[in-house]
Amino acid sequence: MEIISSRQNTQIKQLARLMESARERRKAGQAVLEGIHLVTAWHEAARGFELLLVAESALAHGEIAPLWRDAEAQRRLVVGDSLFAQLAEISAPVGILAIVGIPKPASHRHDCIVLLDDVQDPLNVGGILRTAAAAGVGAVHLSAGCADAWSPKVLRGGMGGHLALDIHEHADLAQVARDFHGQVAVTTLQHSQSLYDTDLRGATAFVLGNEGAGVSDGLLVLATLRLRIPMPGKVESLNVAAAAAVCLFERVRQQL
């Protein structure tokens, strides 16, 4: 069994490019999964791997060994522990990485969608994707100014939520809002009503804005609902990922 120990290996060089560059991910149509949870979730969804990389010392790991056995032989690579530690972004890597093809989003009609307007923090984008998947959202549309939805950080934050969503990047959010068949709800403090006084049971598109600037004026004018989250405490605003969770699960509560 060959064990790769050099960063000059062609497949290792491609992995590094995919991890570092959104442009490379878009060009190749590929992303990198890190850790047992994400790789297992992808495998269980029968998505398939372009390449599965396992650290030499992790081959006998109880959860990694079955993944290794199930992967096609020509799509597997054993990497020396020292090299693997250099490649992984996780501070204490478990020993598994996978290159996967980025799925093309479907164009289904969904009754609940999320529009992200220049949400730039990868951890916020990942957290929102995870929350959206848990709340039964069908699709998430990201403007060009958002963090790359398929970056390693966003994938880790999403914790498998990507698999449950149609993810549309570089979206024209104004057009998405115009075409949506239900109400368009924007979170804002300007001329808004309480989230808890609003009927969210029907088809709803939630628009969430940039961490500092909020929702852009071009989207505000398209809103059919302007929502605020009551905050009796002494802070001006919520983190955008927290605001997304409050809004989406208020809709879940109402539907129940």
Image: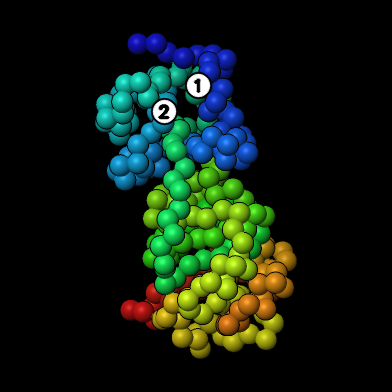
Q: Which residue is the site of mark 2? A: 51
Residue situated in front as seen by the camera: 179 or 185 = 179
The residue positioned 51% from the left and 88% from the top of the image is: 197
Q: Position of residue 242 (x, y in %)?
A: 55, 66
Residue 145 lies left or right of residue 179; in this view the side is right
Residue at the top extreme of this rendering: 2
Residue situated in front as seen by the camera: 43 or 23 = 23
Residue 11 shows which numbered tag? 1
Q: Do the CB atoms of the residues marked 2 and 1 lie less than 8 Å apart? A: yes
Residue 26 shows which numbered tag? none
Q: Which secondary structure, mark 2?
A: strand
Instruction: Name the quadrant containing residue 19.
Output: top right
The residue positioned 42% from the left and 68% from the top of the image is: 110
Q: Is residue 240 visible?
A: no
Mark 2 and mark 1: Cα distance apart in space: 9 Å
The local crowd at label 1, few if under 14, some if 14 to 19, many if 20 or more residues have their Cα within 10 Å, is some
Q: Position of residue 77 (x, y in %)?
A: 40, 21
Residue 220 lies left or right of residue 141; in this view the side is right
